[in-house]
Amino acid sequence: MSHQPCAVVGVGQTHHKTRRWDVSLGGLVREAATRALEDAQMDWSDIDAVVLGKAPDLFEGVMKPELYLTDALGAHGKPMFRVHTAGSVGATTGIVAAHHVETGRHKRVLAVAYQKQSEGNAQFALGSGRGGSLGAGGAFAPYMRSYIARSGSPLDIGPMVAVKDRLNALKNPYAHLKLTDISLEKVKESPMMWEPVRYLESCPSSDGACAVVLTDEEGGKAAAAAGRAPAWILGTAVRSEPSTFPGRDPVTPQGAFDCADDLYRQAGITNPREQLDCAELYVPFSWYEPMWLEAHRIAEKGRGWKMVESGETALDGDFPVNMSGGVLSSNPIGASGLLRLAEAALQVRGMAGEHQVDGAKVALGQAYGAAAQYFSMWVVASSLDPFGR
Amino acid sequence: MASDDIAIIGWAVSPMERRTAKSEQQMLFEVVTDAVDHAGITRADVDFTVAGSCDYVAGQAFSFVQNIDAVGAWPPKRDSHVEMDGAWALYETWVRLLSGDIDIALATGSGRSSTADPALIYPMEMDPFYLAPLGADAMSFSALQARALLDAGKVTERQMAEIALRSRASATSNPHAQVSGAFDVDAALQTDYVRAPLRKHDLPPITDGAACVVIARADKAREICENPVWIKGFAHYSELHNPGMRDLLTSPSTTLAAKAAGIEEAPVDFAEVQAAFSHEEVILREALGLGQDTPVNRSGGPLAANPVMATGLVRIAETARQIREGQGRRGVAHSTSGPCLQQNLVCVLEGDAR
Amino acid sequence: MTAPSAGTVEMTIRFPYKRSLGPVIGAFMTGLAGQQILGIRNGSEVMCPPLEWDPKTGKELDHGALVEVGPAGTVVSWTWVPKPSAQHPLDKPFALALIRLDGADTALTHAVDAGSIDAMSTGMRVAPRWKAERQGHITDIEAFVPGEDPQGLDDSRPEEPVTMMPYNAEIPYTLPIAVNTARNAVALKEKRLIGLRCPVCSRTYAGERGFCPIDTTALTAEHEVQLPQTGTLTNYTIITPVQYPGQTETEPFARCMILVDDSDLVIGYQPVIDLPVEQVRVGVRVKLVWGDGDIEGWQPTGEPDVDDPDLVNRIY
Ligand SMILES: [Zn+2]
């Protein structure tokens, strides 16, 4: 075994917006990467390798953009690696980068993920240019109807998640949507876009990037000694499964359970609800919060919505979810997964600012992609042995 | 062998065709089936899969998603995808196996280059402000690099033709070659340029194809395979993008990758390099430190078959095959991406001592 | 071995992109609109075209350190394009060249309109030929021409800084049609609904599916089954259309999951006919309505609804 500890010592992201027309493509990824390097107190020259992730190249019309962005990300004379696993790609990017450190290939790896949706038209791209495009909301709406039916959830739960995440976003300086007057009524009055999903229960389309600096045990300990808390990676897991087959249940996909089980085993977690202090989950549509709470064994089957209803998943609740405001508040698709991992890291480092969960020591970051069939997750902690194993 | 060593235990290369009627899914189904069979295992034994493919080659966003039906992802599998040549997919599987908790992984590379005009696709991978809007494609940049070599006296047009001749002549014995057979160099040098100074013989064919390589950790490799081919070193490096800002006479990232992969630790018996344009072999030979007597691309190389997104993985499979068939004990495989050899990967393979 | 050919389908990816330029590329493009070519200082060197960063180290450059270069320069390398593509800047044979402009240390890639390959050589001197209508784009220089003297000089200068750039990529693809897709299309033309039943697990898939992903089994003609053209609506969404290039819908429309009778096949995201959106519900019995060579949608049969609480979970 050559599995060595790996720590997050730098996190950076852009201000996410509908259109970041103030920056070039290179400028956008550098804005995130520069912040991550500053956080890690490193320079470009300190980085040994770069891993880049983003969703389809057709969105911006730049094929294999790792080529163009090699020098923008200081990777001249270094390894540059490109990942693409649909919506989960940002998280997979962080995980692939972590493997490079955990296996001793490199000491310091920069993971960067981005999307500049304003350069093209995602709705158009998803529909391959044809009319009557379902959009991601239309594709996922039946899943949510099924969840509501089987769980007996009150219909207010989706809107409650939408309000909670937008309130959290008000505390996050980088979040895209800043809906200061958000309320349950406002969400319920917003247009029904993909019944049962309303406009304000769906994610925006954002330009943005996220970057994370990963380092080995020595680097993590050095950061800690210098008073800059690292986030130690306790485990990483990925799973994929086929899009469709008769009997596939996309509400509780087997891949989601398998991925979480693998992750918890690595992290020494037997009771996720108790041992995790908070979670940053990929929730592009409101109902995905209770759905993932169940499909990742944080809530028992049919009880995810109760965690929402009781306020447990609010920022001041017992199990905060999507402290950053989540995908519902910022969605640069390719970066969204890495933003989830990054927020989990910020929380256990105690560096989440106004959206900090008091005393967070162990956090889950998760992303999913395509027809709820790609899963990527990590658990990070403020120490290498938070459960005293 | 140390317990951390990893070996190639099986591989498969699809037929190489100018235009296949098969879907990418079908090509992948066949190479994965053949590769796991070659390794003496089943899909169920594979702990991790990584695919290398490209949406712009496939002509569809998220084109890789449907491919997992054919690779096999049930029960749900550890799986990833790179928008890079399958050689980089194999690199990801190799790094993952180094973690030590899983034993067997496979990587695929697949592409149907026939689906659209390369002159229209490849400008899309260039600088989106300064290069793509000029329609500057990979072949044009290769020609600029070839001209730089000619001007510097590092190669002649005849030597370029001779490289192509040697490649296609040796491809005659390769069942996976699309273009093979000797040709008359003098006559070839009389033909028109396609992109001066490149003539038709200097260019790779347009190829549809796929490849799959299966690797395992040492203990497992020994258990299921009589003659594993060991991955002695594996590395890739990139360079700044714009060819106008680089020295086009050398490939420093190839040299970096070769050194990191330990190429200098022992003499190399042969090489398979992704020299899709004849003159690139000259640059790569020098960058890899290979002497003129070291055989390069006995398979014919990309000049005989160039399945984009799989060409690099085919080099690795070919290197493994030649080692297993006793044509050398230590071989080096190379892959590249981007204009003028921007990004390069080197994999050093060895058979057991005989 | 060559697979049986089922023909090909033509398809063009045509996307209108608009790129934001940022401070340095924006200044360069603004310069072009005003017939000025700018480089950027990078240590003791000048880079043209300019980048925001030092490409060798990634360090941010002083974005204000722009200097005019050229307009003439020297060809460092060149190739000849005898048959230009639709994406090329000229529609007649031309050279694509690396040009080191006077005062710059790196080379700009651009076209040289030399008339003939015989007029091209490494080391030759070239100067820009400006377009009359300039928008702040790399093709504001129509091409370089042999000699020292720029052509097409005028007094036109941009009124506003250029900050955006349009990019229209158009790639026509010819994609092979998979055998199952072709066979399914024939069946649809004959108004037959076919499925493919996996010989291993007996699941039934839609007629064009290539593989059973459960046991990675290839599905072929021998697995074809004729399916009844009736079913039950299991789940749905009502979509309020958003406008985007190519959108054809203006009113809310339903997309429904249909469990086909006598099988375990759910056909996803189907249109419904004669069922107003407010009446779409789980359990409606429907029959297939044929359009021109394809399924037009599913229409209520008038039978009583199926009352099964698990039905809504049959998304696939
Ligand atoms: Zn089956």
Image: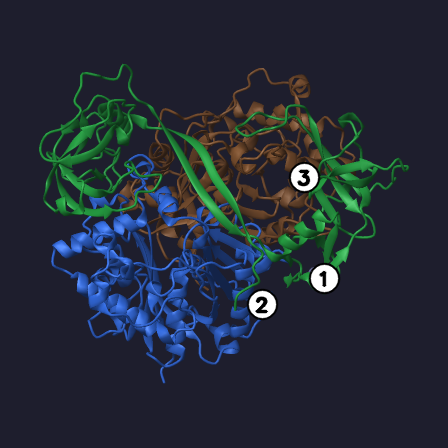
Indicate the position of residue B58 as horizontal and vertical percent values.
48, 49
* Residue found at x 14% / y 47%: C118
Q: Nearer the viewer, mark 1 or mark 3?
A: 1
Regarding residue B72, the answer to whether it shows in the image is yes
Q: Which chain is blue?
A: B
Chain of the residue on which disc 2 is drawn: B
Asked if the residue under mark 3 is in contact with the one under mark 1, i.e. CB atoms within 8 Å, the reply is no
Neighbour class for label 1 at 10 Å: few (<14), some, many (≥20)? some
Q: Are marks 3 and 2 on the same chain?
A: no
Say which residue label 1 marks. C223
Can you say whether B293 is above or below C277 in the image?
Answer: below
Q: Quadrant of ligand 1?
A: bottom right
Chain of the residue on which disc 3 is drawn: A
**Chain A appears in which tint?**
brown
Indicate the position of residue B154 as horizontal and vertical percent values.
14, 60
* Residue found at x 16% / y 61%: B155
Give the number of the disc on residue A295.
none
**Chain C appears in which tint?**
green
Q: Quadrant of residue A185?
A: top right
Asked if the residue under mark 2 is in contact with the one under mark 1, i.e. CB atoms within 8 Å, the reply is no
Say which residue label 2 marks. B45
Say which residue label 3 marks. A291
Give the SS element for disc 1.
helix
